[in-house]
């Protein structure tokens, strides 16, 4: 019976915990760094593809 009560409470608290983490400055900074890394990776892939096209 304890598990029957725990699951709905956990389901209700999980979004609150996620919102608390997402609203922190550390999360925002990490997301920004990740976005810059993905942008750099995209630029490298595009440059590699462009060099392959010009060599053909």
Image (cartoon, helix red, strand yellow):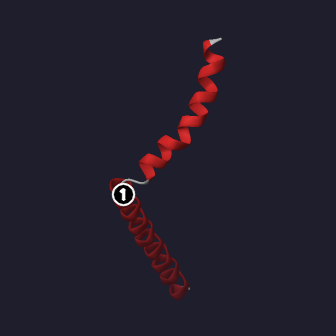
From the viewer's side, name the closer residue of 15 and 30. Answer: 15
- At label 1, counting other C-alpha atoms closer than 10 Å, the crowd grade (few under 14, some 14-19, many 20 or more) is few
Residue 45 position in % (x across, y down): 48, 73
From the viewer's side, name the closer residue of 3 and 47. Answer: 3
Check the picture and name the quadrant holding the C terminus: bottom right
From the viewer's side, name the closer residue of 22 and 42. Answer: 22
From the viewer's side, name the closer residue of 50 and 18. Answer: 18
Residue identified by numbered label 1: 30
- The answer to whether residue 14 is above or below residue 4 is below
SS for dot 1 = helix
Taking 45 as reference, is 8 left or right? right
Please tell me in which quadrant of the rendered image residue 32 appears. Answer: bottom left
Residue at 33 percent of width and 54 percent of height? 26
- The answer to whether residue 2 is above or below residue 44 is above
Residue at 49 percent of width and 45 percent of height? 18
Q: How many marks?
A: 1
Residue 3 position in % (x across, y down): 62, 17
Taking 36 as reference, is 18 left or right? right
Residue 10 position in % (x across, y down): 57, 30
Residue at 65 percent of width and 11 percent of height? 1
For this orientation, the residue located farthest to the top is 1
For this orientation, the residue located farthest to the bottom is 54
Residue at 54 percent of width and 36 percent of height? 13
Residue 51 position in % (x across, y down): 48, 83
């Amino acid at each position: 019976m304890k598990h029957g009560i725990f699951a709905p409470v956990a389901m209700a608290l999980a979004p609150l915990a996620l919102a608390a983490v997402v609203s922190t400055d550390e999360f925002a900074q990490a997301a920004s760094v990740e976005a810059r890394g993905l942008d750099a990776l995209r630029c490298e892939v595009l440059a590699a593809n462009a060099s392959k096209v010009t060599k053909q």
